Amino acid sequence: MKIKSTLTLTLTIFVILTSCSRQQREQTDRNPRVRVPGKTADLARRQLFCDGFEALPLQSKRYAYHLYRACKAGGAAVKDQPSTEAMIDELEQAISFAPTEASSYLMKLVKYLQTDDKGFYNAYRRLWFEAESRPVEFIFTLTGAEDDSVDGKPAFEAMILIEDPHPDELIDTLVNDTSWSLDAQLIDDNHDPGKTILSLFKAYQLLYATDSRLPMFRYLWKANRVKGFILTNVIETYTREAGARLASININLRWSFIMPELKLLRNRMGGVKDVVVSYKKR
């Protein structure tokens, strides 16, 4: 009788564990965000998902994947010595899947990595800035610090952005919040004064970043033109962690974003410059 009771208990536990495991697998299969290639373990721990990746056509996915491999091979965030050769190889594979405009500026970046000629890097930055934003964006920036170089090669920061397939709720909340209104004429005299600064930005998701910071916004400017991205999955992650609703998200962001950088843009002329606005816990 005792043996029969023990066997019954063991069988019951086995059935429960099997059921839980099956439910977990089914939940994972239903949630495409947990299966996104290219998402680092660090970003996964932060629950930062890029479901925009799943909406991409296959060629764009391959393009993003090889950009990710390039970042991993040569990224400043990699503790081991970066491999420029491996990075070049992955970038060349990415070029084979890239849109025409993207392949043009990526070839300049490859030339820079091969020759260390800063002219190629500047050409890459110029062509990237002038190109129309694509579903997959790759931002590569030299850190400029001599101490950051490894074996004579300058360190860099890079990020891969994916166009947000469903940005409406977050963007509408930000644009309709009057406290976020900033005369777009501060950036570009050709814009209507009634527009908010956020109307100049496009909604993207962060797929991967070499830097340990998770930026909420990334904007670059040249003369009076600006090319900016709102990283919606980062914003949603931080507001979720803070237990905040989208309507109150400006508590976390306005201090970092509106003042003082954007008001200085008209005075910053010349080459392409970029600014990362990242979340800082206080």
Image: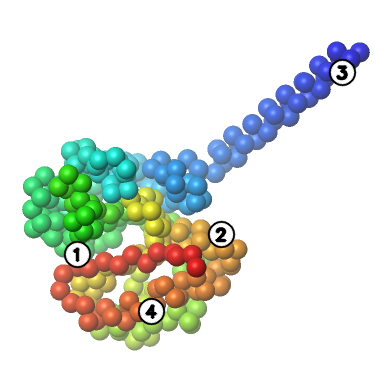
Disc 3 crowd, CA 10 A, few/some/many (<14, 14-19, 20+): few
Tell me how far mark 4 sits from mark 1, CA to CA: 26 Å
Determine if residue 26 is in view: yes
Q: Residue at x 81, y 16 (%)?
A: 7
The amino acid on which the numbered mark 2 sits, given as a three-letter code, is: Glu
Secondary structure found at label 2: helix
Q: Which mark is residue 241?
A: 2
Question: Which badge, 3 or 4, is on the more N-terminal residue?
Answer: 3
Q: Is residue 195 left or right of residue 221?
A: right
Can residue 127 be seen here?
no
Cα separation between marks 1 and 3: 75 Å
Q: Earlier in the sequence, mark 1 or mark 3?
A: 3
Q: Quadrant of residue 101?
A: bottom left
Q: Secondary structure at mark 1?
A: helix
N-terminal label among 2 and 3: 3
Question: What residue is shown with label 1?
Answer: 130
Q: How is the image coloured?
A: rainbow
Q: How far apart, in angstroms, are the residues tagged by discs 4 and 2?
A: 24 Å
Task: Point out the tag, 4 or 1, that comes first from the N-terminus.
Answer: 1
Label 3 amino acid? Ser
- Write down the residue under mark 4: 259
Q: Amino acid at mark 4?
A: Met
Mark in front: 4 vs 1: 4
How packed is label 4: few (under 14 Cα within 10 Å), some, or many (20 or more)?
few
Ranked by sequence position, the earlier of labels 4 and 2 is 2
Say few, some or many: other residues with alpha carbon within 10 Å of mark 2 (under 14 / 14 to 19 / 20 or more).
few
Pointer 3: what residue? 5
